[in-house]
Image (cartoon, rainbow, N blue to C red):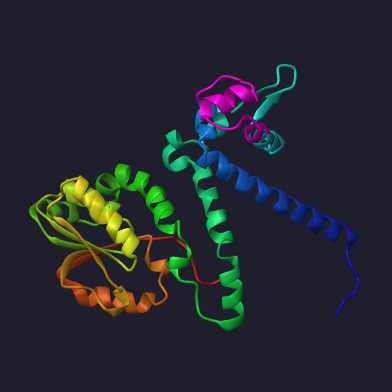
Amino acid sequence: MNETMDQAKAEAFAGRMMALLNDAFVGMLVSIGHQTRLFDTMAEMPAATSDAIAQAAGLEERYVREWLGSMVLARIVSYDPTTQTYVLPPEHAAFLTRSAGSNNLAFFTQYIRLLSAVEGDVIRAFREGGGVGYEKYPDFQRLQAEESAALFDTALVEAILPLADGVVERLRSGIDVIDLGTGQGHAVNVMARAFLHSRFVGVDFSSEGIEAARAEAASWKLPNARFEVADITAGLPGQFDLVTAFDVIHDLAKPRVVLANISRALRPEGVFLMMDMAASSRL
C-alpha cells in the first residue's frame, strides 16, 4: 500500500465532501419549500419581507425567515439587505414551481425524505440480505403519481403512444390493453378517456395504488377502465393486444420473468410498449 498522500487531492476531496453535506441539507430545505408552496408563493410576488411572504403563504414568519436565510446562502433566493426583502428570480422559479410542470426540479427533492426514512431497513438488508418492500415507502405511490401525471396529461396520447406504429388507430377501433405497474392508474385512465372503444386494465401489487386508480376512474365515469391487484411475476391475467409498461421494468426484482410473461400474454400482432430509462447495468 502506498502511504504517500497527495495533500492537494486530499483537500479537494474534503471540499467535495463539505459541498455534498451542504447540498444535502439544502435539498431537504428545497423539499420544504416545495411542500409548503413557498416557491409558488414567491414566484407570484415582487421583492418582499419575510413577514409578507409568510402571510401570503399562510405560514409562521419565524420559520419562513430561517428558511429564507438558507435559500439566500444557497443562492436560490436573492436578498436586499437595505430593504430586508427577498425575491425568487424568474430564472430560478422556472425550475422550482408547480407552474413549471415537468421542469419543476424542486418536486424531486421530496425523495430525499422518502429514502432517508428507510435507511435503517436498507442497512439491515446490507447485513441480512433480502430487500426492502414498497410498503416501507409510504409516500412512494403519491410521489410517483404526481411525477408522472404531468407527462401523461400532456404527452401520453399525443406523443408516446404514436411511437408504436399503428397503435393509435387500433386503440380508436377497440383493443384490449393492460398497463403493468400501473401505480395509481393515471396512465390507464388517460388512455381510457381518449379511446372509449378500447378496454383497459391496470395491474399493480399495491392495493393503495389500485384504490386510488379506481377512485379516479369512477370520478371520470370511465366504463372501459378497471384495475386489479396482481403480481405480474406470476403471469398476466389474460391475453392482450397492447401491453404497456411506463417506467416499470427497471424496478422489477425479476425483469426477465416478467418480460417472458408479457411475450406469452400478447396476442398475434400484439404490441409491447415500454418506456424506461436509457441506462445500463454495467458501470
Q: Nearer the viewer, residue 196 or 221?
A: 221
In this rendering, position of residue 103 left or right of residue 89: left
Where does the image place residue 133, in percent across and percent down from the top left?
Answer: 45, 71
At 21% from the left edge and 77% from the top edge, which residue is drawn? Answer: 264
Does 63 lie within the magenta span?
yes
Q: In which quadrant will I find the C terminus? A: bottom right
Please identify the residue farthest to the bottom as the structure is shown. Answer: 128
Residue 70, position as x, y percentages in the image: 69, 38
Q: Is residue 212 above or below residue 283?
A: above
Can residue 181 be seen here? The reply is no
Please indicate whether residue 258 sits to the left or right of residue 104 in the image: left
Residue 93 lies in the magenta stretch? no
Q: Residue at x 29, y 47 (%)?
A: 159
Left or right: 281, with 185 as reference point = right
Which of the two residues, 237 or 4, is positioned nearer the viewer here? 237
Instruction: State the image coordinates of residue 102 (x, y, percent, origin top left).
Output: 43, 43
State which quadrant residue 180 falls in. Answer: bottom left
Residue under the point 57% across and 43% down: 32
* Residue 31 vertical placement versus 78 (above, below): below
Above/below status of 199 relative to 104: below
Quarter of the image for the N terminus: give it: bottom right
Give me the residue at 33% from left, 59% from top. Answer: 209
* Frontmost residue, 162 versus 266: 266
Residue 179 quadrant: bottom left
Q: Position of residue 190 (x, y in %)?
A: 24, 48
What segment is highlighted magenta in the picture?
A: 44-65
Q: Taking the image as drawn, is residue 90 in sight?
A: yes
